[in-house]
């Protein structure tokens, strides 16, 4: 086959552009990336060899070998891992398969300092070689195949692939260093980079110089070493390698469990939310090893979906090496490890929440919405997860937990009140909150879509039911208004009972089928009206969410209750008009305008905008008429 020329996928082109303009302050990380890939390639071959030992017959000592040629000004990184064939090469070294790539590129601003932080988080992997190279050559041969291939590129948009010779399986990446990059030919510099970034790699990283071969790293899997011998930087570098992430770990959990079932775990909670957290094709990112052999990093069996933000490694001595990626799913030992891991992770999060609430708040902002999925998915750990949950509330003093909330409940208050919506600012100004604020009753402000699902699933916490402030059934009268000692709250003057009854009757008549009911409200103090859901009916925010996602037919509107505020001047005045019994046209207009107003506040469309505008104009016009 002749030499073929390919063009990089557009995303790679953009990434290479960024790399060329060298956003990285630490160019030397290219070496970490290449060593990391070499080590991954050995891991993958070791796994394949479990079922096909011939693949590694004659050469089962995995290693990464670094060599330099001062005259040619090249640095190469070689491995005896799985290697790549023609199609692997074209597919993996011409594209970025990682989920979230597009989202990442979209977020780049072109402002170097801002983008730097982003790209540091995303990582450019193999393509980082172009930060220091004029051109890069990859000579590779896939284990079990005879034909080798050479890939070359100058990182400017195209690459070539041609048939080549390589005596054995594996991959050699050779960098033709750019003019200013001679430092990477220095032995001391290479040694220092490997020690800093790649010491944790489980196989030897060897520096070759003529006949001399020297291992530069510790070369034992980091999680097998005693905690006391590992420092924070080593944990961090391992986290970068294993998690393909580039931030700092927020929490490190390194333990070994001895017993009937022995395993160790080295798990990390990231300090920033990964791009693919809510991506539909998101994967787990914790690698399962058995007796130091990498088995899989894509199993739902090891950890539940609501812990998908974790990165790291779990290694067990007690699982059979012949376990397949498929049988893991049903293995009882894996299930045991899973429940042990969940308990440990939740336990450690709980400690953080107690000891460092501010730091925990940062974690919660990143991953709270994910963890809440566990509340309805994982019945066994529901109590623990609810204890870990944090919420914004009308108290406005940062995040609150349910235990705090319950301990502050007012005399006569018998439910945990909440309101759901799309964003805090909007939700916090909802009229339905007024009466609760006036009585000093705290209300949780819930703005994650997942809130609509776990609340109905759990229904209560420590025997206190959850109750939406936008649903009927709240018994506010049982709680005394919040009074400050020197400023007793005035009971606002209310419309008289007969007038109110007349008004309610008139509104019902005018609105007919448009509402389920019209009632005097206890929950309003400042606004004239609001909508609420009948107890047991679907929450209004959920209805909107479902409609947005087309999960609810357009014709299927659920009727709501219109509540009116008897002490609002407008309602009082309307009650007088209703009592006088001569107000048919103004009352009909008012009824529809009140309902439309309540809908607008709720974020719902006005049903008939033309009629709304006509009525509004008529009422304004009447209002402007100077009395005779
Ligand atoms: P990542 O390591 O995050 O997948 P990289 O850009 O570092 O991203 O590498 C891209 C892909 O190229 C790897 O996933 C792998 O399939 C392939 N690759 C890179 N280096 C090697 C190697 N030394 N041996 C085999 N495959 C490799
Ligand atoms: Mg990589």
Image (tube, rainbow, N blue to C red):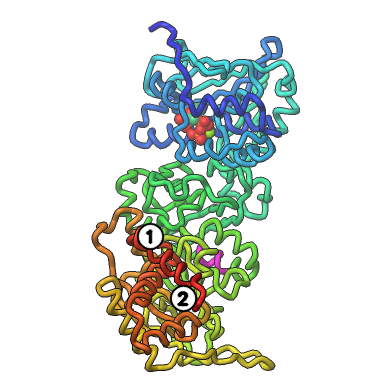
Of residue 559 and residue 319, the one placed in the foreground of this image is 559
Residue 468 located left or right of residue 213: left
Q: Is residue 73 above or below residue 394?
A: above
Question: Observer-nearest residue: 537 or 211?
Answer: 537
In the picture, residue 211 is in which quadrant? Answer: top right
Residue 104 visible in the picture:
yes
Numbered badge on residue 432 = 2
Q: Quadrant of residue 47?
A: top left
* Residue 347 among magenta residues: yes
Label 1 packing within 10 angstroms: few (<14), some (14-19), many (20+): few
Mark seen at residue 605? 1
| Vertical position of residue 17 compared to residue 102: above or below | above
Q: Nearer the viewer, mark 2 or mark 1?
A: 1
Q: Which segment is the magenta one?
A: 345-350
Find the residue positioned furthest to the front.
Answer: 628
How far apart are labels 2 and 1 at the CA level?
A: 18 Å
Q: Between residue 322 and residue 372, name the one nearer to us.
A: 372
Q: Main secondary structure of the magenta part?
A: helix
Report if the beta carbon of the residue with label 1 is closer than 8 angstroms to ligand 1.
no
Q: Residue at x 37, y 89 (%)?
A: 579
């Amino acid at each position: 086959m002749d030499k073929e020329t390919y063009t990089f996928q557009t995303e790679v082109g953009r990434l290479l552009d960024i790399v060329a303009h060298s956003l990285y302050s630490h160019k030397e990380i290219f070496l970490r990336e290449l060593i990391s890939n070499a080590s991954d390639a050995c891991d993958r071959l070791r796994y394949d060899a479990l079922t096909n030992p011939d693949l590694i017959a004659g050469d089962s000592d995995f290693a990464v070998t670094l060599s330099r040629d001062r005259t040619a000004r090249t640095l190469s990184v070689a491995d005896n891992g799985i290697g790549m064939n023609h199609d692997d090469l074209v597919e993996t070294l011409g594209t970025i398969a990682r989920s979230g790539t597009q989202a990442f590129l979209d977020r780049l601003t072109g402002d170097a300092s801002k983008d730097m932080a982003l790209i540091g988080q995303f990582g450019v992997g193999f393509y980082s070689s172009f930060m220091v190279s004029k051109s890069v050559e990859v000579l590779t041969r896939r284990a079990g195949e005879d034909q080798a291939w050479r890939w070359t590129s100058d990182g400017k948009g195209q690459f070539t692939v041609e048939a080549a010779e390589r005596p054995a399986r594996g991959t050699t990446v050779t960098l033709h260093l750019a003019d200013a990059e001679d430092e990477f030919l220095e032995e001391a510099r290479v040694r220092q980079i490997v020690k800093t970034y790649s010491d944790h790699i489980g196989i030897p990283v060897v520096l070759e110089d003529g006949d001399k071969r020297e291992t530069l790293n510790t070369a034992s899997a980091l999680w097998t070493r005693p905690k006391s011998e590992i420092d924070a930087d080593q944990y961090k570098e391992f986290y970068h390698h294993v998690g393909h992430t580039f931030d700092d770990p927020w929490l490190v959990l390194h333990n070994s469990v001895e017993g009937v079932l022995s395993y160790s775990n080295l798990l990390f909670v990231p300090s920033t939310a990964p791009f693919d957290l809510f991506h539909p094709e998101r994967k787990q990112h914790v690698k399962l090893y058995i007796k130091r052999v990498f088995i899989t990093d894509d199993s739902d069996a090891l950890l539940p979906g609501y812990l998908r933000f974790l990165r790291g490694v779990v290694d067990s001595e007690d699982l059979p090496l012949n376990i397949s990626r498929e049988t893991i799913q049903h293995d009882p030992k894996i299930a045991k490890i899973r429940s042990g891991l969940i308990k440990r992770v939740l336990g450690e999060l709980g400690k953080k929440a107690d000891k460092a609430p501010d730091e925990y708040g940062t974690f919660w902002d990143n991953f709270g919405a994910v963890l809440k999925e566990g509340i309805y998915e994982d019945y066994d750990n529901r109590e623990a997860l609810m204890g870990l949950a944090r919420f914004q509330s009308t108290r406005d003093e940062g995040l609150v937990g349910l235990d705090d909330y319950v301990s502050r409940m007012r005399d006569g208050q018998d439910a945990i009140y909440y309101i759901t919506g799309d964003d805090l600012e909007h939700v916090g100004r909802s009229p339905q909150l007024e009466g609760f604020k006036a009585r000093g009753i705290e209300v949780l402000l819930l703005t994650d879509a997942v809130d609509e699902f776990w609340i109905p699933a759990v229904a209560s916490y420590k025997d206190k039911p959850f109750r939406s402030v936008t649903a009927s059934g709240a018994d506010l009268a049982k709680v005394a208004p919040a009074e400050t000692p020197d400023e007793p709250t005035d009971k606002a003057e209310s419309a008289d009972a007969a007038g109110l009854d007349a008004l309610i009757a008139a509104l019902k008549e005018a609105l007919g089928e448009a509402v389920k009911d019209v009632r005097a409200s206890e929950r309003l103090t400042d606004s004239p009206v609001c909508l609420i859901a009948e107890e047991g009916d679907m929450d209004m925010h959920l209805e909107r969410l479902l409609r947005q996602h087309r999960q609810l037919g357009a014709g299927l509107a659920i009727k709501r209750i219109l509540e009116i505020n008897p002490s609002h001047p407008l309602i009082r005045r309307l009650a007088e008009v209703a009592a006088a019994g001569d107000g048919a046209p103004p009352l009909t207009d008012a009824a529809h305008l009140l309902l439309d107003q309540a809908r607008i506040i709720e974020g719902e469309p006005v049903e008939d905008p033309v009629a709304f505008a006509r009525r509004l104009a008529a009422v304004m016009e009447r209002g402007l008429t100077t009395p005779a």
